[in-house]
């Protein structure tokens, strides 16, 4: 079997667990960096690679010719993409001749797309799967080599999960390597439908998140849906959004609370207490607003309510002067 020499495609320090694994095995040929404006994450990655004398190549959105020539010069014959924000074109896929892999955080084919962790957290999944699959022209659709499952803690945010998933990458790659060496590796073709609640349906797509995706609808969302939306958007996306007076405020963290009261409109303040915090009625129960981000600063629910003049009986999005 030909010894693999990898080009790792990434643009985030979260790939460093993969870098270290491949370095230890003597299989890292280079790292191909995303084409992006310098940011702290990318700069830190570049510094690490420079310190360890890892060759860095630059992905160019207009052409693959220079990159392919550099890969050839370095003797790279395999590729691994992890947190790489560009869709890899067919010419580059063909260069690797079936030896270009991607690490995707979902149980493919479900949640194909650029933001699978956000959408899975928003839906309240209890497990996230880290999947290693072949890169083909259709995004996240190549045959699956192997996977590892990660339980989701109720307090996990997107950022927490990305860090936990990154720590699992070496185990995923080692599992793949051992299966290859033992001749037990079986490539599983992805199906084009999945089973949800006993019914066959199309896989969900993990699209780029828009502001509308972050909006809390007090009339429609349950308390658990609001909690999940806030943690899915914490912290990179700045939290869930809720309309307040003439603007949007950001809810970074919330907690589900029991509420047996009937006949109260969702979005109404139920309770305000220094210890219990700010409780707001939802469609099914209530939520405590734990952390709110405003232009004036970051506040717990109680301080937010006091500073902004909220009190029990008032609606966060008032439609009338109706009180409890």
Image (spheres, grey):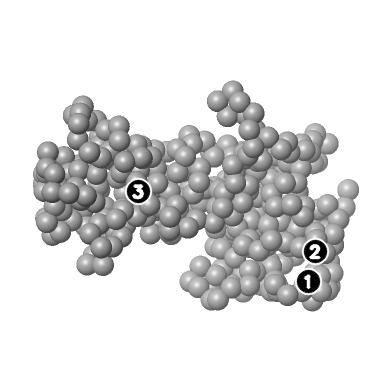
Q: Residue at x 38, y 52 (%)?
A: 215
Task: Please report whichever mark, 3 or 1, sits nearer to the chain's N-terminal start.
Answer: 1
Q: Which residue is mark 1?
A: 64
Q: Nearer the viewer, residue 90 or 284?
A: 284
Q: Is residue 249 left or right of residue 273?
A: right
Do we see residue 252 in this rendering?
yes
Distance Cα–Cα, label 2 vs label 1: 7 Å
Q: Is residue 310 left or right of residue 225?
A: left
Residue density around tag 1, few if under 14, some if 14–19, many if 20 or more, within 10 Å: some
Nearest to N terminus: mark 2 or mark 1:
1
Label 3: which residue?
A: 216
For disc 3, the neighbor class at 10 Å (few under 14, some 14 to 19, many from 20) is many
Q: Secondary structure at mark 2?
A: helix
Which numbered tag is attached to residue 270? none
Q: Tell me what residue is drawn at x 50 percent, y 73 percent.
A: 39
Q: Are marks 2 and 1 in contact (CB under 8 Å)?
A: yes
Is 296 drawn above or below residue 252 in the view shown?
below
Secondary structure type for disc 3: loop
Q: 246 and 296: which one is in front?
A: 246
Task: State the residue position of label 2.
Answer: 92
Residue that sits furthest to the right in the current view: 1
Task: Judge from the rendering whether residue 164 lies leftward or rightward of residue 88; answer left or right.
Answer: left
């Amino acid at each position: 079997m030909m010894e693999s020499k990898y080009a790792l495609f990434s643009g985030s320090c979260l790939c460093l667990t993969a870098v270290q694994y491949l370095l230890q095995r003597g299989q890292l040929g280079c790292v191909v960096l995303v084409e992006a404006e310098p940011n702290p994450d990318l700069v830190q990655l570049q510094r690490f690679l420079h310190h360890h004398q890892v060759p860095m190549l630059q992905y160019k959105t207009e052409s693959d010719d220079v990159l392919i020539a550099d890969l050839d010069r370095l003797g790279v014959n395999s590729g691994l993409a992890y947190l790489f924000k560009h869709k890899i074109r067919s010419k580059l896929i063909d260069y690797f001749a079936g030896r270009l892999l991607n690490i995707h955080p979902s149980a493919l084919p479900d949640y194909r797309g650029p933001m699978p962790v956000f959408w899975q957290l928003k839906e309240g999944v209890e497990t996230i799967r880290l999947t290693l699959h072949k890169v083909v022209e259709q995004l996240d659709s190549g045959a699956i080599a192997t996977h590892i499952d990660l339980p989701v803690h109720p307090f996990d945010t997107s950022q927490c999960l990305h860090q936990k998933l990154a720590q699992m990458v070496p185990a995923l790659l080692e599992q793949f390597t051992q299966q290859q060496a033992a001749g037990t590796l079986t490539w599983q073709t992805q199906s084009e439908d999945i089973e949800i609640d006993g019914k066959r349906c199309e896989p969900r797509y993990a699209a780029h998140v828009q502001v509308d995706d972050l909006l809390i609808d007090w009339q429609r969302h349950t308390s658990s849906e609001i909690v999940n939306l806030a943690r899915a958007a914490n912290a990179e996306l700045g939290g869930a959004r809720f309309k307040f007076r003439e603007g949007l405020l950001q809810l970074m963290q919330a907690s589900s609370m029991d509420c047996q009261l009937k006949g109260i409109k969702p979005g109404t303040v139920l309770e305000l207490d220094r210890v219990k915090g700010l409780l707001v009625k939802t469609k099914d129960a209530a939520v405590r607003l734990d952390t709110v981000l405003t232009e004036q600063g970051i506040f717990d629910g109680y301080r937010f309510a006091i500073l902004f003049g909220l009190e029990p009986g008032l609606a966060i999005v008032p439609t009338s002067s109706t009180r409890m």
